[in-house]
Amino acid sequence: MTRPPQAAELFRLPYGPARNRAVYDLFMGGRTKAECARLSGLSLGQVGAAIRWCYAQGLPRKGRGRADRPAPETEREGSGGGRKPPPKEPPGYGFEEDDDGGARAWSTSPRITTLDQLLEACAVDLQRWQVERYMVNKWEVGAKTDDGDIVIEPLFQVKAWLKPNAAAPVEDGLARYIERIAARAQKLPAPRYNLDAGEYLVVPSMFDAHFNKRSAVGAYTIERAAADFCAVADAAAGRIRALSMPVERILFPAGNDALHADNLAGTTTDGTQLETAAEQRDAVDAVIEAYEYAIRRFAEVAPVDVVVVESNHDRYSMHWLGKVIEAMFKRAPHIKVDATHGPRKYYRYGATLIGLEHGDKVKPRDLAALMAGEAPHLWAATRYREWLRGHVHHSASMFYPITSDSGVTARVIPAMCPPDEYHILRGFVGSHRAAEVLYYHREYGPAGSFPVFVSEVAPAEVSVLPRKAAAGRKAA
């Protein structure tokens, strides 16, 4: 084994790491720089350069506190009496979190000269941290060799101060989740339609379902709401087939207070407190399954255009519902989904322009001017113009109010949900729970409608959600 050089032999060693480390060990052994120079035969400048080089490699500085010193070799480990191995030399870089919630990364290693190298060496999680500021210092140290040559060596110091990343908006997480759904979406081939003969647009209007609403008698559970919704979709699709009118496309408005509440706190989008029937997350599962079921049923009749309509109870939830539906049918060429933002949507079929709006913000007398101003090109290309609205939960007649202003008709679609305590208190009773299916001719515009009453088609008993019920029917 090669013994370490004696102090008096240091001046014979060539300049390099071995000599620098020997000078450092002598200095850390309790000697001053002047004593190291006298004992080694080196100049004071050479001793200082050797010590600075060792500091740059991350070796401890002289005079650190007891807590920073390596444990003495006399400490024993276990019952075997063996000594602990000496601690590893520090790598010359490090990362530590501060008490104020921030963090700091640093390096004095000559191999780390940039911010990117520092972050990589310290394994900084950039999803959690972001760089607030940083600094890179470079200087040079020189020493004279035994031959009288001056050796210059560059030294680096890199520091970075970090702060936590702001919480990512929920929309970012939703977008990533939707992308995963779309990538795994089932491929749905289009059925064989006789579209050449088609000359009608059908609009099954299933408004104001209010999943998770607590009805006055308490019977409108989440399971009941889903079962009613799917039963109405079945009945509407069956009657459209039975009428045997040549259908070219189906426009299916989604939303319009599909959910009673907009969040886990049980409030509307604007913060109005509501009475809910159960856990909101169960309602989310149910409304997604119900809409998927209904869209598939209508797609058996004709190609479907799903248009998502925002509403006062669940304006934010309708954004993600539209995105989920869009992802579900990403690989279904016969199903198109409009999940764009906007309180009002416009849809043209032949000579008819249809406006979709929930009905809680705009007065009927303003709808004609609004349509002409927001969709002037569609307005100019059509002769018949109608608005389909919901929101109103009370009417004693079979069909809800129809008004006309400046040649624009506004239809109010009935609600599918039963009344709650609020509606009974206000006297909003006696209304029909129903959906309304409307027909539009490509050339001649509005061509009639028929209702689907919930009480007429709803199953007597329900206990499971639509997907589970469908699975049970297949198993049977």
Image (cartoon, rainbow, N blue to C red):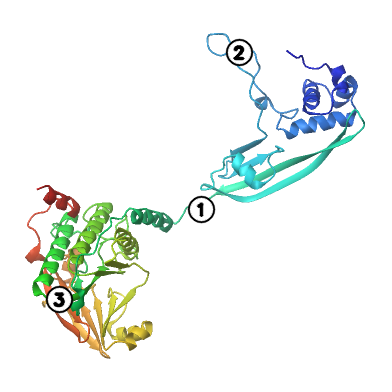
Q: CA distance from mark 1 to mark 3?
A: 49 Å
Q: Is residue 255 visible?
A: no
Q: Which residue is mark 1?
A: 166
Task: List the residue tagged with mark 3.
Answer: 395
Quadrant for the N terminus, please: top right
> Going by the image, does 147 lie left or right of 439?
right
Q: Which residue is painted at 34% across and 73% down in the image?
A: 343
Which of pointers 2 and 3 lies earlier in the amino acid sequence?
Answer: 2
Q: Where does the image place residue 164, in percent across and percent down from the top left?
A: 54, 48
Identify which residue, 454 or 85, lies in the foreground: 85
Q: Nearer the viewer, mark 2 or mark 1?
A: 2
Q: Which residue is mark 2?
A: 83
**What's the amino acid at mark 1?**
Ala
- Mark 2 falls on what kind of element? loop
Label 1: which secondary element: loop
- Please say whether residue 223 is visible from this viewpoint: yes
Task: Residue 220 in the image: state x and y as whole percent.
Answer: 15, 58
For the residue pair 236 and 228, the one nearer the viewer reads as 236
Mark found first going from the N terminus, 1 or 3: 1
Task: Please tell me which of labels 2 and 1 falls first in the chain.
Answer: 2
Mark 3: secondary structure: loop
Q: Is residue 398 left or right of residue 90?
A: left
**Classed neighbour count for the residue bearing mark 1: other residues with Cα under 10 Å, few (<14), some (14–19), many (≥20):** few
Mark 3 surroundings: few (<14), some (14-19) or many (≥20) residues within 10 A: some
Picture quarter containing residue 443?
bottom left
Left or right: where 160 falls relative to 43: left
Comparing 85 with 31, the one in front is: 85
The Cα atoms of the two marked residues, 2 and 1, are separated by: 47 Å
